[in-house]
Amino acid sequence: MRNNIIRGALVGILMLAFASSSVALADEGKGCSNIGTWFGVAPFPPGQMPPPTVEIPPPPWDATYLTGWVASAFGKSSNEGTNIFDSPMFDPTLGIEQPPFSLAARLGDMRGNWKRTGGNTFDYTFTGFAYDASNMPVYIAKVSGQVILFEECQYQHTTAIMEVFLPFMSPFHGSGPIAVIPLGEFYGYRAKVDLPY
């Protein structure tokens, strides 16, 4: 009888250990979902941003001022998927007065992928073309970075770095980029269903 009690206790301990490990596995990847549409926001109106020496306060602040970019994340799960990025106000010359940058008139929509790296953290990459005034590609832009969701999943903090390739180069294989340009840090705000009545 004593052996049965000891066996029963050991089986109970083993079952508890397996249950704990399965709960831990089930919790991996849980957290905010970044699926949806995000608009770039700032605490100051566009064109009235403070000098770089002025620290921008972290949210929560009123997400009134749109900065001109929008991103949409899609996926069959909240762990990975595809994304689309559009920034019609982006200066494709980046203030560089040499080709190919000086030839760029606009940056087209960019598309790529994202994946969860933690509860509320994600990595992303998207790629697109910069075009000249006659819609000929002048360079390929490959942008990558990290996203952190916070404030009950309504805000995102994003970092971005852009690799630049000439149109005949592959951004996926072969030689490296002709330039690597840090783009900085940005805030996004999740779009909501918001009926006016």
Image (cartoon, helix red, strand yellow):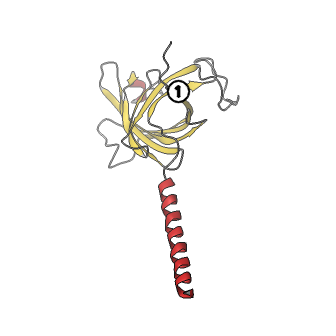
Q: Which residue is at the front of the view, 99 or 109?
A: 109
Residue 130 drawn at (x, y percent):
37, 28
Q: Which amino acid lies under the numbered mark 1 shown in the image of this protein?
A: Gly
Where does the image place residue 111, in percent across and percent down from the top left? 36, 35
* Above or below, comparing residue 101 to residue 195 in the picture: below
At x 65%, y 26%, the residue is 61
Left or right: where does residue 82 sit relative to residue 34?
left
Q: In the current view of this chain or complex, which residue is farthest to the front?
A: 1
Q: Position of residue 103 (x, y in %)?
A: 38, 24
Image spot of residue 52 (x, y percent): 66, 29
Q: Which residue is mark 1?
A: 40
Residue 87 in view, yes or no: yes
As drawn, the residue found furthest toward the right would be 54
Q: Residue at x 32, y 49 (%)?
A: 173
- Quadrant hosting residue 166: top left
Q: Quadrant of the N terminus?
A: bottom right
The correct choice, above or below, for 99 with respect to 182 in the image is: above
Residue furthest to the top in view is 197
Q: Can residue 140 be seen in the rendering of this structure?
A: no
Residue for point 53% across, 48% down: 119
Report the side of 17 relative to 48 (left or right): left
- Mark 1 crowd level (few <14, some 14–19, many ≥20, 10 Å Cα): many
Residue 9 location, quadrant:
bottom right
- Residue 146 in the figure: left or right of residue 51: left
Which element is circle 1 on? Answer: strand
Q: Residue at x 31, y 28 (%)?
A: 137
For the residue pair 40 and 173, the one nearer the viewer reads as: 40
